[in-house]
Image (tube, rainbow, N blue to C red):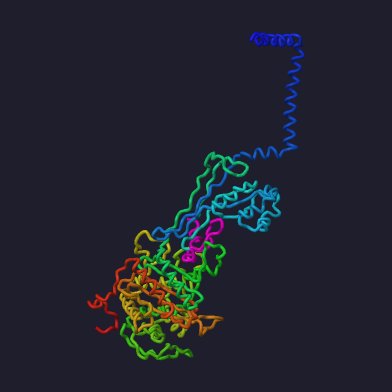
Amino acid sequence: MNKSFTRKPRWRALARQALKTFPVVSRRVLVLWLVFAMAGSMVARATYLQLVHNDFLQEQGNERFLRVVEVPAHRGMILDRNGEPLAVSSPVDSIWAEPSELLRQRERWPSLAAALKLPLSELEEKLAGRDDSKFAYLRRHLAPNLAQQVLKLKIPGVHAKREYRRYYPDAEVTSHLLGFTDIDDAGQEGLEKAFDPQLKGIPGRKRVIQDRMARIVEDVENVQAPQPGKPVVLSIDRRLQYLAYRALKTAVAENKASAGAAVIVDARTGEVLAMVSQPAGNPNNRAELHSELLRNRAITDVYEPGSTVKPFTAALGLESGKWSPGTRVSTSPMMIGRYSVRDTHNYGVLDVTRIISKSSNVGVSKIALSMPAQKLWQLYQDLGFGSQTKAAAWDGEQSGVLRHFSKWGEIGHATHSFGYGFSVTILQLAEAYTVLAADGMRRPLTLRKREGPLGPDEQERVLNASAVRQVRAMMEQVISERGTGLKADVPGYRVAGKTGTARKISGGRYISNRHVALFAGLVPASDPRLVMTVLIDDPKGGAYYGGTVAAPVFSKTMGAVLRIMNITPDDMPSMKIAGTVQPVGALP
């Protein structure tokens, strides 16, 4: 203990003695030299790092840096009238790389390609010639869990970016109607494109601190909040869409047809409840995004409507006062100039009701020729033929062809009365049939759900109500043993409809063995709620008449639709016994 206490004073004494013997001037010079030496070393180090070894500073700076990054905004949903999703945007991750960094990691490319589920050659192609590039997508729209597996490899220069991918729950059932978006979630076809301004979101921005792997270390502040796209509520009923699609697909397959289309409309509101087409592709699989598979044939393809327009000719005749349901006329073949107008069978003398139920070309020609051609042309214009329906502002909707009556001639006047010489879309035909369902009032079609009743200024009268009711009664006879549309019958409900069969045109001439089969109908006939039009294009299964090929699609679809919509039957046995159902022409 005594030794330890005696050492400290001894050292302190030595230090004091050294300072006394060292000159004051020398001590100042030493301090100055030390300061200059330290400053010189700092300048030398800075010069070396900036000019010779600057990659060290770059790496250190990249460890943490402040940036403004984009905050993605998801696209608005497309919903059916009941709020069921038809199109949604799901979060996904896209893997991107800094080629200049990744090119220094070639030995890790095989493992990266395997994680990305890409051939190594494709990965090499994506990075080829991009030595100075700072950004390149390696694979877009990976599921988040798969993207995390890629990031776990911790390969320098490989990063993930959050994006959104469009998903269609009903796949091909709604593909023609909705269309699709591109890889950047922008609408390209169908309603996705028509409503793109409303559906697309506006990305936001935020200031963040990122590390060198582009991972966000800290959110600093929001610069601009993202604005998600607004939802679009359609008039479509997802359940009805499926039922119509299933029936149409079955009919196209069974009849070996080239294509088909069908539309269901609410006659009271003009809302389109279903719109389907065949053939179809799955928009969730980009390999199937072929125009032929995704074409909405209800609006893009035009056809001569054939006998489906005969009820309008009859209504015009009844409205003129020159004709009544019981007016009788010979339907034997007749000549108009050098052209012959005939039916599939010579039915002899028929009244107007039987002209419709038997679908007599000669009979409706005589009705049309009894009035100026301008009358029939004006009626067709008022029904919407020759112009777009404007149900939605989509690209590709055809207006059809309706020439001015001055170019018809007498034979054109006759052929227009039974559906030849002009062309329409299936959607236009559905809109026209809503006039028959609504006692002569035309209501504009829409693919957006209506929030309230139609105003008086949104409707226009096209035909006399009394004439239309008489024609509907005639159309009920079409769905009977004596008519051409018995296969459109829906048990428990009165159906009013009309079959149609038209030859196809090729090279400006009609082809005898290629046809278009059509059916258009209203149900329940006593108080029409729904209109459905069906087209089967080029059936090759042997049968080709509208009553044989297209009418069953109506029956199968409406049989289920009426139950789903809880529409009261109007043709039950008890009603017939009570005498409440009395079709025109039936014996008491």
Q: Residue 565: give x, y in percent of width and height.
A: 34, 66
Q: Let me know if residue 370 appears in the view.
A: no
| Range drawn in magenta | 171-199
Q: Is residue 198 left or right of residue 529?
A: right
Q: Let me know if residue 538 appears in the view.
A: yes
Which residue is situated farthest in the left direction here? Answer: 578
Front-most of 87 and 114? 114
In the rendered view, would you say 63 is above or below 187?
above
Q: Residue 474: give x, y in percent of width and height.
A: 33, 80
Q: Is residue 466 left or right of residue 190?
A: left
Q: Image point 43% across, 63% down: which residue?
A: 447
Task: Please say whether residue 195 is one of the residues in the magenta stretch.
Answer: yes
Q: Image point 57% across, 49% down: which residue?
A: 148
Task: Please say whether residue 406 is one of the residues in the magenta stretch.
Answer: no
Which quarter of the image is occupied by the C terminus?
bottom left
Q: Quadrant of residue 45?
A: top right
Q: Quadrant of residue 19?
A: top right
Q: Residue 517: give x, y in percent of width and height.
A: 45, 79
Q: Residue 442: give x, y in percent of width and height.
A: 38, 69
Front-most of 22 and 302? 22
In the rendered view, would you say 181 is above or below 548?
above
Which quarter of the image is occupied by the N terminus?
top right
In the rendered view, would you say 278 is above or below 27?
below
Q: Image point 55% across, 65% down: which residue?
A: 289
* Number of numbered tags placed on the structure image: 0
